[in-house]
Image (tube, rainbow, N blue to C red):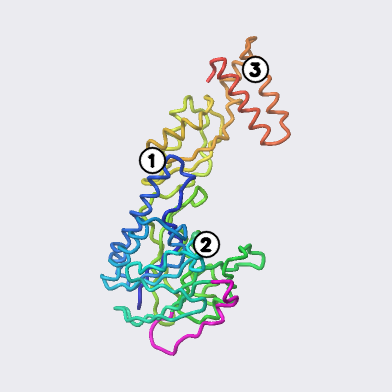
Amino acid sequence: MIRLLHLADVHLGASMSSFGDAADARRRRLLEAFRELPEAARADDVHAVLVAGDLFDRPEPGAEEKAAVAETFARLIRDGRPVFVVPGNHDSATLHRHPYSEPLGGARVFLGPVFERQSTETAGGPLHVYGLSYDMAREDAPLDSYARADLPGFHVALLHGSAEFSPHWRIGRNALRLPLAALSALACDYVALGDYHGFRPPERFGGASGAPACYPGSFAALDLTETGPRGWVVVELEDGSLPRVRHRPSSVPPLQDLGTVDVGGAAHNEAVVDRVAERVDPGALPVARLVGVPDVAVDAELVSRRLAERFGFARIEDASTFHASARLDRIAEDDTVAGHVVRLGRRRIAQAPDQGAAAIAERALRVALHALGVT
Ligand SMILES: [Mn+2]
């Protein structure tokens, strides 16, 4: 049995701009988490490490990122765990300058446009890795170049490309297309993929009759769409059985999608903060949409700021409906400016042709009430 640590789409140096003020810290956190790989590899006692592309976010990464990679790979290799790497599309070897022209700590990098084999002895048995660096200008059907060597041991393909899960699957023109049938036809023990940022275990590739393939997904959330656990996979291969894949989270704080959080009845913004906070898992960064009828005009920016102070980052969208609150029912009965504003605002919301218009009318009502001291 052989155990492999398979990662992809680390995107070292990514801007993380959607994390706003937290972007800088998160960029550093990503680099730190990457440096923890040798400990993780030791904890799971893996025999080798596979990196399936987009290790770097840019073809010309900073000196700090290159040094971190070289150091981390060197440590893994010193521990007896060889490292195999294919470039991705962000750090493609087809570009005039790319990070793989440097030694990177002794990792074995595949730079040719067709499959090459690199074999090694590991404590888990002989390992044969087949990799390529996709170059549409040089080779349009690179998968055809695969030939499984007649050697004992485990045969693993390492690829950065877009699997076609359906004929309507949308794939970029420059991406290496990977039809599922072609992946199955490779007849290897495991296909280590990179490119899609969502985790896709072998079951997603058709199970026992499909390809023994897997996307580990991104190493850490790079933008606010990448919610849920992010990290790498530990793969166990045994003769004649499907790969056993376990997902392992990296130490970069994940985004937790709370979906909708009902803030009905909340009397002030601190209460809204608490409603969200009580649902956040330890170490996670909340993403939430507020709904319900609070007794306060929710200040989403203030709520986000308070939550960010507590958790490091938060993204809060406000879809609550203050206009319908019992508090405004009472004001609406008054013959005052505020009463008139509530009646007018409610009428506009009720008559809004769509949700977008209703949201604008809700906001206008809150601004007007705020000006009148009703918050
Ligand atoms: Mn990527």
The mark tally for this picture is: 3
User: In what element is the residue under mark 3?
Assistant: helix
Q: Earlier in the sequence, mark 2 or mark 3?
A: 2
Horizontal and vertical percent position of residue 108? 38, 74
* Nearer mark to the viewer, of 2 and 1: 2
Q: Earlier in the sequence, mark 1 or mark 3?
A: 1
Residue type at mark 2 is Tyr
Closest to the observer, 157 or 290 = 157
Q: Earlier in the sequence, mark 2 or mark 1?
A: 2
Q: Which mark is residue 341?
A: 3
Determine which residue is flagged by label 2: 196
Residue type at mark 3 is Val
Q: Which residues are magenta?
A: 135-155
Horizontal and vertical percent position of residue 155? 43, 81
User: In what element is the residue under mark 1?
Assistant: helix
* Nearer mark to the viewer, of 2 and 3: 2
Q: Is residue 43 magenta?
A: no
Mark 3 Cα-neighbour bin, 10 Å: few <14, some 14–19, many ≥20:
some
Q: Is mark 2 within 8 Å of ligand 1?
A: no
User: In what element is the residue under mark 2?
Assistant: loop
Determine which residue is flagged by label 1: 311
What residue lies at 32% left-to-right and 66% top-to-bottom?
Answer: 73
Looking at the image, residue 364 sits to the left or right of residue 247; the answer is right
Residue type at mark 1 is Phe
Residue 225 sits above or below residue 155 on the image:
above
The N terminus is located in which quarter?
bottom left
Q: CA distance from mark 2 to mark 3?
A: 50 Å
Mark 2 Cα-neighbour bin, 10 Å: few <14, some 14–19, many ≥20:
some
